[in-house]
Image (tube, rainbow, N blue to C red):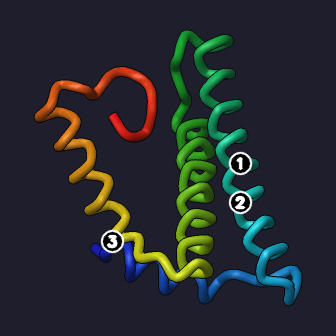
Amino acid sequence: MSMSFDEYQKRAIETAIASTDNEQLQNSIWVMGIAGEAGEVVEKWKKAVAYRGGKFSDEEFSDFTKEFADVIWYIAVLCESLGLSLDELMKQNLAKLADRKKRGVQRGTGDNR
């Protein structure tokens, strides 16, 4: 099944359950969810590299991809809550990166290079 980022975003928010009516607190919970799930991705990757020579069994890789998808879900839900379009964010990001490549400043520090 193929879908746009915005379509995924709209469907993801339908599965979200708010923990509070306080919008700022709820958005903070979504942000913490991104960090928590990203930490799980990192942990699964670390274990593969540290203990298995960078290899995943099929089951381990499936678990890894599920955590990765959870990161995407939290990002989509937060974007929806903030009124941001994932499609538009991705377009802007690619344009920024293409501009950096064109100017030869892909490496380095700072957001506005």
Q: CA distance from mark 2 to mark 1?
A: 7 Å
User: Is residue 77 left or right of 100 when viewed as pictured?
Assistant: right
Mark number for residue 26?
Answer: none
Task: Return the x and y of residue 113 as percentages of the image width and height.
Answer: 33, 34
Mark 3 crowd level (few <14, some 14–19, many ≥20, 10 Å Cα): some
Lower sequence index among marks 3 and 1:
1
What is the three-letter code of the residue carrying label 3? Asp
The front one of 104 and 58 is 104
Quadrant where the N terminus is found in the figure: bottom left
Residue 29 horizontal/vertical position (percent): 80, 66
Q: Which residue is mark 3?
A: 87
Mark 2 Cα shell of 10 Å, populated few (<14), some (14-19), many (≥20): some
Question: Quick check: 101 above or below 50?
Answer: below
State the mark number for residue 31.
Answer: 2
Query: Circle 1 is placed at which residue position?
Result: 35
- Please tell me whether mark 2 sits on a helix, a strand or a loop: helix
